[in-house]
Image (spheres, grey):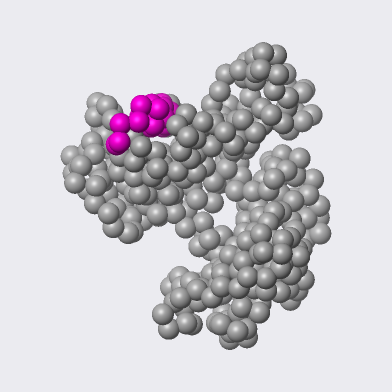
Amino acid sequence: MSTVLVVNSGSSSLKYQLIDLDGGDDRRLASGLIERIGHDDARAVHTTTAHPDGAPFTVDAPVADHDAAFAMMLEAFEQHGPSLAEHAPVAVGHRVVQGGARFVEPTVITELVKINIDELAVLAPLHNPANLAGIVAAQRAFPEVPHVAVFDTAFHQTMPPAAYTYAIDREVAERHRVRRYGFHGTSHRYVSRAAAEFLDEPVEELRMIVLHLGNGASACAVDGGRSVETSMGMTPLEGLVMGTRSGDLDPAVLVHLQRRAGLDVDGIDRLLNSRSGILGLSGHADMRDLESAREAGDEAAALAFEVYAHRIRSYVGAYAAQLGRVDAIVFTAGVGENSASVREAALEGLEGFGVEIDDARNRERRGGARRISTDASRTAVLVVPTDEELEIARQTLATVEA
């Protein structure tokens, strides 16, 4: 049996997938989402291949906590399938956002590991406590199988010190663990290997830039399958312009806003994480809405789009210099996979660096990995759909079989 239950637990949500990895044939047996945990108007949606037309089953009911959410999930499996008796998971894989510098690979969850995840919550206060709540509830629901933590930050622990070190007082940085950790590591790992498979080249011989562009966005320089640089830092705020996050900013802006605008720490946090990015520039947090407004002649939307693409292009250039050569540039996640305009604008003007986009290939809409560069382009430009749940399942199974 090679069935893995993948769990992604948020503060008020629970996402799950049951994935059969038997014989390398990756099959989604079921997936689900339970929202508004802790509220009387929670909703659970369960989709299963056991149902003839694949239609989801929806339940609206109070869900008090994560234990109640797992009970609801088990009831959905029992009522709608597939049967967990016939497809019993051999392990449960958990997405954990922040592993700090302690966790460099997927790790079987012990009491000590849970203590460490809790202690690292100071670096991810919105994520690690929710991830831990899901782990505790899942262990109660599935006490007989191993549980594995797959950390978003782990893939980036191969960065050299020059890449992850901030130039502030060393003792202060060490005392408070201030350094670049990076995020989206599970996606960057999956996509870089999928890109190598598409190119029919060993990942160990490739140098590539992966652009994970969703509501959250990050760039990663991957050398031989290892992360050597990434745009997100100590938190997911640094780097590219995002849906509601500012990305890179002069730190003195924060001091200025505190002194002149009267913003306190919480106000600055809300500004940079929730009211900035393309939302702050245009009023639109969704790239589809931004592109529609831009096409309609909205000047603020046009500027926001240009700022967004300009920042990506700057990182591509910087990472090309770090890598020495670039064999492939890979777009992934919601915006990266679906916006031809973003891909075109982000790489505009890079023909002198061996990057040539084929307009027809770029505009074509179809699933799966595909090449959007010309045949003459020295650098392959690809679109590769990410699959973080599948990557978590694979890493989980490999960990328990090791």
The residue under the point 24% across, 42% down is 373
The residue under the point 65% across, 33% down is 270
Q: Does the magenta stretch include residue 374?
A: no
Give, as a single range, the part of the protein colored magenta. Answer: 295-314
The count of marks equals 0
Q: Can residue 83 be seen in this view?
A: yes
Tell me the quarter of the picture where residue 11 sits: bottom right
Determine whether 41 is above or below 357 in the image.
below
Q: Nearer the viewer, residue 359 or 54?
A: 54
Residue 288 rendering spot, x and y as whole percentages? 38, 44
Q: Answer left or right for 349 relative to 190.
A: left
Q: Is residue 317 visible?
A: no
The residue under the point 48% across, 82% down is 50
Residue 302 rendering spot, x and y as whole percentages? 35, 29
Q: Which of 7 and 155 is in front in this view?
A: 7
Determine whether 194 is above or below 331 in the image.
below
Residue 54 rendering spot, x and y as whole percentages? 44, 77
Q: Does the magenta stretch include residue 297?
A: yes
Residue 86 rendering spot, x and y as whole percentages? 58, 86
Q: Which of 389 and 160 is in front in this view?
A: 389
